Amino acid sequence: MPHLTGGAAGASGTAGGPAGATGTAVRTALGVPGFAHPLVAPAQWTALARPGTPLDWVVLDVAGGPGARPDPNCLQAVDPLHQAGVRVLGRLDLARGVRARADLVRDAHRYLDWYRVDGFLLDRCPLGRAELDGVRGVLADLREVTGTAHLVLGHGSHPHPGYADYADQLVTFSGSWSDYRWSQVAEWTADHPPERFCHFVHGVPRGHLEEALRIARWQGAATIYFTDRTRGRTSGEPWEAMPGYWDEIVSRLGTGVSE
């Protein structure tokens, strides 16, 4: 198990953060895990392409993957993002390591051919050392498909540190605000710059937005997505719609650099 440091106390300034996250200016940007289908949320997809929006990347998930055929609505939604210079990532489901590599490569080709994606979010990525070789093989396959792909591993919590040697970014937290505000960061993350880590947090109240940003900065995650939406039996995925404070978080991150 990796050693853990910190928690909410560190975020409020009463304890030190990871060595790699202190003393440097860090650009914090949004990584959007994937809105609902453009037919359901057209205005939200349009808003992503507004000039000045601090986006690192946006995930496209057509139908639990690229779907069986090109979707003109999705192509219409991502074209303005390409034109604005925003990376679009296709979502690939690793199913905790049991998905066949051939199926993943097939879906990658479809995303590239149909939507000209710039990389992939490998969702439900396994965490353990035993699965590392398999994930490394998948990443190698994807880089053979396109050597310029931006590859993000969607672990959702801290994996074995070896995963950081092979992907561009790791999602080391995905969960609720109640868990995030008392979360801890693995010490090994201090060996890497904040640009390597992503945090997705749902259920963040508007009044705690600045606290959430402090936690991300202290824990060394430069790509974030915070929303006041919650996960429930009837509410679906909390990432499917913009947070109610979208304009506020865009404004807070718009300066680009935070100490």
Image (cartoon, rainbow, N blue to C red):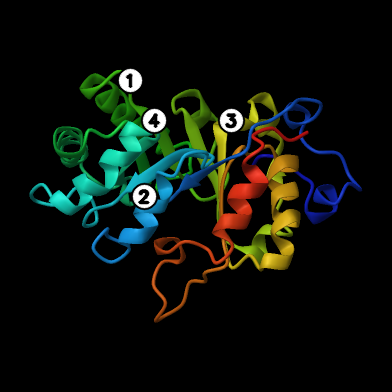
Return the residue nearer the eye: 6 or 117.
Answer: 117
The answer to which of marks 2 and 3 sits earlier in the sequence is 2
Q: Secondary structure at mark 3?
A: helix
Rendered image: mark on residue 96: 2
| Residue closest to the far front | 51
Tell me the CA gap for discs 4 and 1: 15 Å
Residue to which mark 1 is pinned: 148
Earlier in the chain: of badge 2 and badge 4, it is 4
Tag 1: residue type? Thr
Residue at the (81%, 26%) spot, across then down: 23
State the image quarter where residue 88 is shown. top left
Contact (Cβ within 8 Å) of mark 4 with mark 3: no
Q: Is residue 212 left or right of residue 135?
A: right
Q: Which residue does the image show at 27% across and 27% down from the upper left? A: 142
Q: Amino acid at mark 4?
A: Gly
| Residue identified by numbered label 3 | 195
Q: Earlier in the sequence, mark 4 or mark 3?
A: 4
Q: CA distance from mark 1 to mark 2?
A: 25 Å
Residue lying at the far bottom of the rendered structure:
234
Please name the amino acid that badge 3 sits on.
Answer: Glu
Crowding around mark 3 (Cα neighbors within 10 Å: few <14, some 14 to 19, many 20+) is: some
| The disc label shown at residue 238, or none | none
Q: Disc 1 vs disc 2: which is toward the camera?
A: 1
Please name the residue shown 63% across and 65% down the image.
204
Locate the C terminus by quadrant: top right
**Which quadrant is home to the N terminus?**
top right
Mark sitting earlier along the chain (1/2): 2
